[in-house]
Image (tube, rainbow, N blue to C red):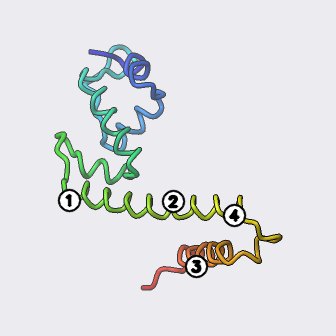
Amino acid sequence: MPDIAEVAKASGLPASTLRFYEEKGLIESLGRRGLRRTFDPAVIERLSLIGLARMAGFSLDEIAAMFGSALTVDRDLLAAKADELDRKIRELAALKRGLEHAAACPAPNHMECPSFRRLVKIGAKRARKRSKPLSR
């Protein structure tokens, strides 16, 4: 059974993250060898899945709920996250095109460029949306 230092080395995560993940219920230690926690060797695969889920934008609470004690995955939650990533990709692609246009725009001043002004309006609208207080 690997101890926490061996798991940290194999996973590339600091021991503090492993302890935090254990507190959150994402991983489970099997016991102790002296003062060090020990883990099932399969914890490395579970940590890889957690890393993948984090990369996809899942919160630790969502990951804990999705994985539970078994490595089963809520397919509806995955589909919803894939849709969310699609929306984000489209938004970022549009932003990229706008920035590329602004960088090459022949207008003497960016605020004279209709495309750049449209980009500024979109940015302002999104900023207002994010700063709105939640209604009760």
Q: Distance between the residues labelled 3 and 4?
A: 19 Å
Badge 2 or badge 4: first in the primary sequence: 2
User: Crowding near pointer 1: few (<14 within 10 Å), some, many (20+)?
Assistant: few
Proximity of marks 2 and 4: CB atoms separated by less than 8 Å: no
Q: How far apart are marks 1 and 2 (CA)?
A: 24 Å
Residue corresponding to mark 4: 102
Disc 2 from disc 4: Cα separation: 15 Å
Residue 78 placement, left or right of 92: left
Residue at 21%, 46% (x, y): give it: 68
Q: In this view, does 119 lie to the left or right of 66?
A: right
- Of discs 1 and 2, which sits in the foreground? 2
- The mark lying in front, picked from 4 and 1, is 4
Q: Please state the horizontal and vertical placement of residue 22, each as a whole percent of the image.
A: 35, 37
Q: Is 83 rendered above or below residue 25?
A: below
In the rendered structure, find residue 92 and report the number of the disc placed on it. 2
* Amino acid marked by disc 4: Ala
Badge number at residue 23: none
The mark nearer the N terminus, 3 or 4, is 4
The amino acid sitting under disc 1 is: Asp
Amino acid type of the residue tagged 2 in the rendering: Leu
Query: Which label sits in the foreground, 3 or 4?
Result: 4
Placement of the N terminus among the 4 image quadrants: top left
Disc 2 secondary structure class: helix
Foreground mark, 2 or 3, reads 2
Q: Residue 125: which disc?
A: 3
Residue matched to label 1: 76
